[in-house]
Amino acid sequence: MDKDRILALLLESVRSLRRSGIIEVDMEVEPDTVLLGTGSSLDSMGFVTFVTDVEERLNRETGKDLYIVLTELEELYPGAAQLTASMFADYLVQLSAQ
Amino acid sequence: MTDAPPVMVVTGTSRGIGRGIAEHFAAKGFVVAGCSRGASTLGELAGYEHSSVDVRDEKQVREWARQVKRGHGRIDVVVCNVGLVKLGALTALTSLDMFQDFVTSILTSTFLVCREFSKIMSLQRYGRIVNVTSIMSELHAPGTVAYASAKSGVVELTKVLARELVASGVTCNVVSPSVVRTESSLAFGDEWMAKMLAMQTIQRPIDVAELCNIIAFFAAPESSCVTGQVIHTCLVT
């Protein structure tokens, strides 16, 4: 999957979770949108739920059995204070290519 | 909740308490997805499906959670029962390996199972997590340094999880049985049994069905206002 499609998938997830009342924030997903860390509209549980939903969508779309491992994100961006949609999408591009 | 039978996940179903829980709730109409390290010992029990999973293994637990979710579309109840049933030793005689074995088998496995299944429950906005500990954590009996410490850790884990998940419609509670009549507890012998029972207000081994009554209470949809609680089956003397 390419990065644009993954960014679109992230937005679909946010909108779906918002519609079903699982997350309360109404946010756009642009490449520089902060998903985790200072400036994020998602609280910790909201982020976990978002990642779980994205994982399901990614698997449905790729037909693969992929796992988003948060420690891999930490290894990819050591010391990063924030996780942006662009950073997350880059990780997911790599993951979906496996 | 839907009209479909509720789906209950139970760890450690090959014997003892876990096996009894699986049998009890399968008979009550639940779909029980159970696991143990080996093959099923429950035969062709209606409503029961078995997976061979080592719940101390992160990857296996992750894959199992996804498999159950895919198979049933939802998970209503998780009962973390798996443990390590063997006699301990006085602290001075407890090896590091033995201590770590208890902690990994009881506390780490509960952490992994709760972590993976709670993510699914958060997304579905509903769930009941019931962790099984032991009255041993209240008895402070000599020789239980590893077992009781690990079980006490499960209580704290459950309470933290209860706070984290409360807004997601997921409750997390603990049942803490006194000595339960299982093949393992009976195998420890009469002297051990008498010593344990002497420290309890209910001075008889309880049956798994009695424990299931408490699990059913925590697992009920109507128990949405109960979270972070521990029910001991009796007091310690």
Image: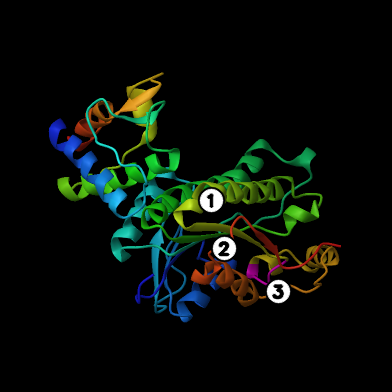
Which x, y percent locates residue B133?
Answer: 64, 57
Residue B225 numbered tag:
2
- Residue at 31% over, 63% down: B73
| Count of numbered tags | 3
B234 with respect to A44 (left or right): right
State yes or no: residue B181 in magenta: yes
Circle 1 chain: B
The earlier-in-sequence mark between 3 and 2 is 3
State yes or no: residue A44 in magenta: no
Q: Give the magenta part as a residue range.
A: B179-183
Q: Dot 2: few (<14), some (14–19), or many (≥20) neighbours within 10 Å?
A: few
Q: Secondary structure at mark 3?
A: loop
- Residue at 37% over, 46% down: A24
Does residue B109 show up? Answer: yes
Circle 3 chain: B
Which residue is under mark 1? Answer: B110
Give residue B46's quadrant in the image.
bottom left
Q: Nearer the viewer, residue B17 or B189?
A: B17
B84 with respect to B222 (left or right): right
| Co-location on one chain, circles 1 and 2 | yes
Residue type, numbered disc 2: Cys
Which x, y percent locates residue B182?
Answer: 64, 70
Residue type, numbered disc 3: Ile
